[in-house]
Image: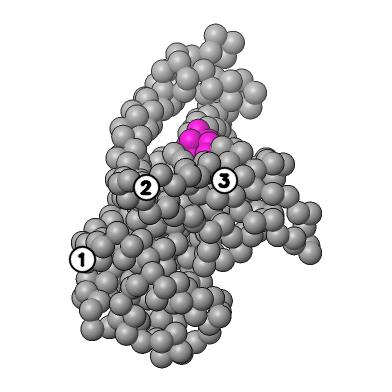
Amino acid sequence: MNWPLFLLGIVVIVFTSTNVLFTMVLPRRPFGIDRLTLTVNRLVLRVMNVLSHFAPTYEWKDAVLSVTGPFALVVQLFIWAAGLTLGFGLLITATHHSFGDGLLQALTSVFTVGAAHEGGVPVPSFDIPSGAIWVVIVALQIAYLPTLYGSFSRREALVALLESRAGLPAWGPEILIRHQLVGIIDTLPDLYAAWEAWAADVAESHTTYPVLLLFRSPEAWYSWVIGQLAVLDAAAIHLAVSPSSASSRSRLCLRMGFTLFDRIAVSLGWEVDPDPDPEGPIALTFEEYAEAIDKLASAGFPVERSAEESWPDFRGWRVNYESVAYRLADKLTAPPAPWSGPRYHLRGGPVLPRRPPQRHPGERPLRPHAVVGPPARRSNPSRRSRSQSHPS
C-alpha cells in the first residue's frame, strides 16, 4: 500500500465531494472551498468574451455570450468528474496498480456505475463507491437545473415588463417621462414596490447560485442589470426633483436595489464601501443629469426643484450603487444603455431608447420603421470604430 498516494486520493475525493455539496445543496453565499465555482465561471466568461470579440454587432455578441451560463455548468460537471476519477485513480494505484491502470479503472467505474475495467485487477471497495458517488452527483445536477431555471424565470419576467415603461435599452429618466406622457404617474409606487421585492429575490438567488449571473436575457437588449439601474435612477430622480410627491416606496426600492448590487459584489470578492460619502464623486456628470431634467420638464413631469437644486440629493443616492452597477454591467457586457458606464468589450457608445410616437384616433402619422433607433456612430481613439445594430 502506497500511503502517500492513498491519502492524496482521499483529499481529492473529499475536496470534490465538498465542492459539489456546497455548490448544489447548501443554499448560501460561496465562501472557502466552494469559491472554486466562481473561478470556473470567471474563466468560462473570459473565454467567451474572447470568442465574442469578432462579432460584428451587439446582437451577435449577445448570441455568443448567451451560451456562457450553460457552458459553465457543463465545465463544472466535467471538473467534478475529473476530480472523482483522479481521486479514485490514486486510491486504486495505491493498491500496487500502475497509475495508468488505476486511472483507467477509476474512469470506467465512474462512468459505468461501478463496473471494473477488464485490463486491471478489480478493486470493488473503490470501484463501487466511485460509481455510486457519480450517480448522486448527476442526480443532484438534474434537481439543480429546475432551481436555476425558476430563479432565472422570476428574474426575467419583471425585466420584460419594463420594456414598455423604460424602452430598450432601459433608462431611468425614460421611465418617468413615459409615465408622464401616458398619464400613469400614480402607478410608480407599485413599480417601486415590485422592484424592491424583485431585488430581494435576485439578491438571494444570485449570491447562492453565482452561475445565474452568466445567464443572459432571452432578448439581446434586455438586461436585469440595466433594468435595475434604470429603476434606481428613476427613483433617485423622483426623490430629488419632486420630494413632496415621491412615494416612500421609492426609498425602499433604492435601499434594496443597492443592497442587491453590494451583496453580489461581495459574493464575487469585490471591495465595496458599505457607507459611501453622500457628497463623494460619481461618474455621471452634472451636464448629463441637467439634460435629463430638461427632458422631464419638457414632457410635463411635475418638477419641483431645478437640476442645480436636486443634484446633491440625486448624487447622494447614486453614489451608493453607481460603481458596482457600472462594474457589473461591464463584466457581463450588458447593453450599452445611457448612464450605465463604459464597456470594455464593446466598440460603440451608449444607445438612447426611442419611444413610439403619440397617436390618437383620426390621425394617421407615418409609422416609423424602427421603434428603437440605431445607435449613433462614435469614434473611439483606442479602438477601431464599428457600428452596432439595434432591434427593430
Q: Are marks 1 and 3 in contact (CB under 8 Å)?
A: no
Residue occupying the point 59% across, 50% down: 374
Q: Are marks 1 and 2 in contact (CB under 8 Å)?
A: no
Q: Main secondary structure of the magenta part?
A: helix
**Of the numbered discs in the image, which one, if any, rests on residue 273?**
none
- Please state the horizontal and vertical placement of residue 128, each as a whole percent of the image: 39, 21
Which tag is nearer the camera, tag 1 or tag 2? 2
Viewer can see residue 14: no
Q: Amino acid at mark 3?
A: His
Element at badge 2? loop
Q: Which of the marked residues, 1 or 3, is nearer the chain's N terminus?
A: 1
**Magenta run includes residue 332:** no
What is the magenta range?
A: 65-74
Q: What's the mark number on residue 186?
A: 1
260 displayed left or right of 43: left
Q: Which residue is mark 2?
A: 363
x, y (%) of residue 124?
A: 42, 19
Of circles 2 and 3, the one toward us is: 2
Q: Give how far apart the Cα atoms at labels 1 and 2 are.
A: 28 Å
